Image (cartoon, rainbow, N blue to C red):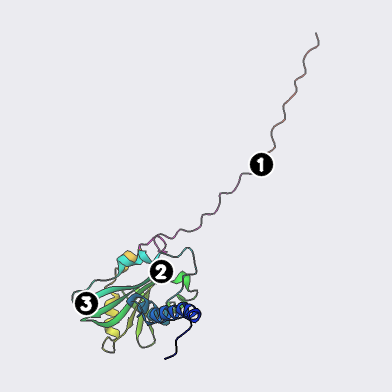
Amino acid sequence: MPTIPSHWRKALIPLLLCVFLTVTACSKAPSPYAKVQQETSRRGAPAAVVKSSEQGATFNQFFPVAKGYDVIPAQEKKGFAEYKVTQEGKTLAMLSISDTLNVPGSAAKYQSSTSKVGNYPSVEQGTTATGILVNGRYQVKVLSRDPAFVQADRVAWLQKFDLQGLAKLKGAPTTASAKLPVAPAPKAPMLPSPQPRLVPQPAV
């Protein structure tokens, strides 16, 4: 068997080491969190574009908790939070709250709504999603991930959210808190200042 010259061996060792490291890095399985991020991104999770939108962490307190189900955080960013509903390891639905300030026009579809859930306008988004708009700004949505999770289930889960608490967020406009603009008080006309009267003095 022919021997490899020593100067070739010195050149091949770094090359083989680089190949080994590259193959090892590529063979690592993606983390579960990265998989969830990729999955939710494909569904078109809204991108935060407005600095004044609510922090995603603010929405966490309004998500429901239900006996017999696991409600697990899936994604959170500025203006958006999403959880998934699982039962015995099976994903049934995705729950989300989003600030519509980040998606111009997203609240417009609720203006013509003729149905309500919890006194808030609701719309069907395709055949697998039901959403409501809280106080003209926050969209709460339930997306079916299992065929057995039907429209009635989505409505029931929408009602499990703390919608009253969400409506009390500082950024949410409410009829009670809306203030009419106050007209400035009219300014009084400027009157000329009276001129001093000169009284003639008797000569001494």
Looking at the image, residue 14 sits to the left or right of residue 64; the answer is right
Element marked by disc 1: loop
* Spatial separation of the CA atoms under disc 1 and disc 3: 73 Å
- Residue type at tag 1: Met
Give the residue at the far right of this rendering: 203
To which residue does mark 2 refer? Answer: 77
Magenta-highlighted residues: 168-189
Q: Which mark is residue 190?
A: 1
- Residue at position x 35%, y 83% from top? 129
Looking at the image, residue 112 sits to the left or right of residue 29; the answer is right
Whichever of labels 3 and 2 marks the residue nearer the N terminus, that label is: 3
- Residue type at tag 3: Tyr
* Residue depth check, mark 1 versus mark 2: number of the one nearer the observer: 2
Q: Nearer the viewer, residue 200 or 123?
A: 123
Magenta span: helix, strand or loop, mainly? loop
Element marked by disc 2: strand
> What percent of the width, then of the height, locates residue 99?
42, 70
